[in-house]
């Protein structure tokens, strides 16, 4: 098939001076609970209740309810049923099962986007650039969150809601579990991963469907190997 011309896409740069946003109680609760998980104060698999968190943080249960919705979106917690919530916990088998599905769906997403005549990759590029910045600084937590933003932007651009919905159920908790388990990749490793994301976008922009899907598949397999070696897995 003919190769599409790669057009330079504008990347949004936030100004250095801007209005400082007010932080709501919900956002403060999200920050406190997230920090407690990252520090290990709240352990993987630990049960969380709205009432218990509300008492510890000195806020109302409605605030905690909103915070838990946000934390679930970020992958830090998972729901096991009505009013049953716990800090995300994955076994080695669960990680294997997730990747069995994820590899195929992420590869399909790359294929669908690369096949488009002029995909809008601005959100992907913004996330990729943040990944590069955080990789150079060795900020793994911020890197993982930008990595998740990259993939979410790619799923969205696939214009397939079923694919997007399936991946939303699987990937956020998988990526965030690396943070919970205190994975400490080197800056060099993070830079290498960021470079793969950049090359993937270049291939998608050029309409190289086969090359993009192969790179995505290889990237997923490498990620699976890393995740199955996380500390503390059973």
Image (cartoon, rainbow, N blue to C red):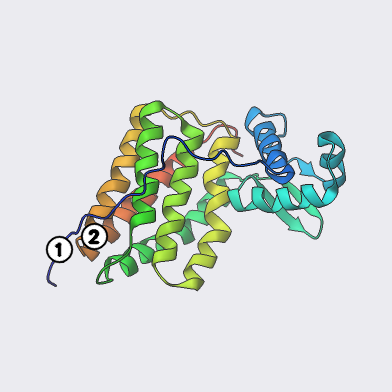
Proximity of marks 1 and 2: CB atoms separated by less than 8 Å = no
Quarter of the image that includes the C terminus: top right
Residue at 24% from the left image edge and 72% from the top image edge: 117
Q: Which residue is drawn at 46% across and 50% down?
A: 149
Say if 187 sits above or below 193 in the image.
above
- Dot 2: element: helix
**Is 184 placed left or right of 73 in the picture?**
left
Q: Where is residue 37 in the image (x, y as percent from the top left)?
A: 67, 35
Few, some or many C-alpha atoms within 10 Å of disc 1 (few <14, some 14-19, many ≥20)?
few
Tell me the residue at 39%/40% (across/down). Answer: 131
Question: Which residue matches tag 1?
Answer: 5
**Residue 194: quadrant of the picture:** top left
Residue 103: tell me if it is visible: no
Q: For mark 2, does the 10 Å Cα neighbourhood hold few (<14), some (14 to 19), or many (20 or more) residues?
A: many
Q: Mark 2 points at which residue?
A: 205
Q: Is residue 204 above or below residue 71?
A: below
At numbered mark 1, what does the secondary structure look like: helix, strand or loop? loop
Camera-side residue: 84 or 155?
Answer: 155
């Amino acid at each position: 098939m003919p190769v599409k011309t790669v057009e330079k896409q504008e990347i949004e740069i936030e100004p250095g001076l801007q209005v400082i946003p007010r932080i709501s109680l919900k956002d403060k609760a999200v920050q406190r609970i997230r920090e407690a998980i990252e520090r290990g104060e709240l352990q993987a698999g630990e049960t969380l209740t709205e009432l218990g968190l509300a008492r510890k943080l000195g806020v109302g249960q409605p605030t905690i309810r909103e915070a838990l919705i946000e934390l679930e979106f970020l992958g830090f917690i998972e729901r096991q049923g009505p009013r049953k919530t716990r800090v995300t916990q994955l076994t080695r088998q669960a990680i294997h099962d997730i990747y069995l599905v994820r590899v195929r769906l992420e590869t399909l997403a790359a294929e669908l986007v690369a096949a488009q005549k002029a995909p809008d990759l601005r959100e992907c590029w913004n996330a990729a650039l943040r990944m590069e910045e955080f990789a150079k600084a060795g900020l793994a937590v911020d890197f993982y969150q930008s990595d998740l933003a990259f993939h979410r932007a790619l799923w969205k651009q696939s214009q397939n809601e079923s694919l997007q919905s399936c991946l939303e159920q699987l990937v956020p908790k998988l990526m965030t579990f690396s943070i919970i388990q205190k994975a400490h990749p080197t800056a060099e490793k993070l830079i290498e991963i960021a470079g793969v994301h950049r090359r993937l976008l270049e291939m998608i922009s050029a309409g190289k469907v086969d090359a993009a899907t192969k790179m995505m598949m290889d990237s997923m397999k490498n990620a699976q190997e890393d995740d199955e070696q996380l500390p503390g897995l059973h």
